[in-house]
Image (cartoon, helix red, strand yellow):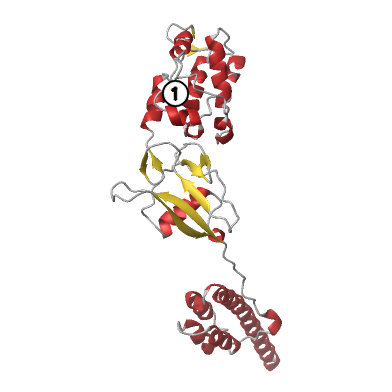
Amino acid sequence: GHSTRSLAGARASARARESERERRGEETMSLCTHALRKALGSGVGAWLPMAAAAAASTSGLGASAAAAAASGAGSTASLKSGLALGAFRTSASAAVPAPQYEEANKDFKIYRWDPDNGDKPRMETYTVDLNDCGPMILDVLLKIKDEQDSSLSFRRSCREGICGSCAMNIDGSNGLACLTRIDKDTETASTVAPLPHMFVVKDLVVDMANFYSQYKSVKPWLHSEGSEKVDGKEVYQSKEDRAKLDGLYECILCACCSTSCPSYWWNSDKYLGPAVLLQAYRWIIDSRDSITDERIQQLDDAFKLYRCKTIMNCAKVCPKGLNPGKAIAKIKKAHHGTLE
């Protein structure tokens, strides 16, 4: 009886050991297959140490497979043979095909000028793989600056179409680089240039001093002196009056509209331009403001306001979908006594 129980216990122990070997062998198979797949797809040298680590983590893999995986100079064939000599077998149907990767190279012609080196402005061509890049023009510029030419200069900040910093001329139309999608046609080169008719500081960076000076001239803040206040603190505004500000307050002062306006090109020293006039109307129509008449009279000038010829390039290029031309028309009506 004692010998029978001992024999049964030995058989149970043998079965447990066999089960453990099978489990560890399956685990090793999974780890090494994963390493082999990456080796075939991305270059053996970069992933062979992973196969070695997989082999060393279990005892079910033969020493020959571990050695083949650990040798940095080994080829894909030696790795396969090493795995085949291990504790498991692979069939032809289990072979992992190498992933197919196709480059989508596209040329980008970018305006370059550095005042410090004395060279003339030029359009420089950079080639970018669209399959290894984000979807927006800003992604292209960042990739070029990071990987090809660190001297490339441009403004950017929020990357969400809020700050207006990355305004530039893309394929002939003004827009924000962070919101403008790349043209996927790899046969045609895309062009990126600074905002038109602006003084260039360097590459895609333009001088915004005149634009901001004009913005300051319309006093873009609330004047509520003498207004009746709720509890002595808040100037009341109805929902209807608040709704009049929609389509005006969203302006981010990117200057896309002003620099697309031919009138602003030729008279930027006198004509305020679509962006600034939109901002001026935003304060004119605000029911809480107490200097509305003064604001209207300030703009009653042949150049400040009436250089607008309703070409409407401003509404076409605005990245926020606003209509500066409509605001300018309402300012003209206000000069004739109709404020709406």
Q: Nearer the viewer, residue 311 or 84?
A: 311
Percent position of residue 201, x then y: 35, 41
* Image quadrant where one finds the C terminus: top right
Query: Depth check: 282 or 277 in front?
Result: 277
User: Most extreme residue toward the bottom, as rendered?
Assistant: 3
Against 157, is 301 above or below? above
Question: In the rendered image, is residue 67 in sight?
Answer: yes
Q: Quadrant of residue 220?
A: top left
Q: Position of residue 280 (x, y in %)?
A: 48, 20
In this figure, which residue is indicated by the disc labeled 1?
271
Report the quarter where the N terminus lies.
bottom right
For the point 61% across and 79% down, which residue is it? 29
Q: Residue 219's spot in the image, x, y percent?
A: 41, 18
* 97 sits to left or right of 66: right
SS for callout 1: loop
Between 277 and 53, the one lying in front of the other is 277
Q: Amino acid at mark 1?
A: Tyr
Question: Which residue is depicted at the point 61% across and 16% down?
Answer: 239
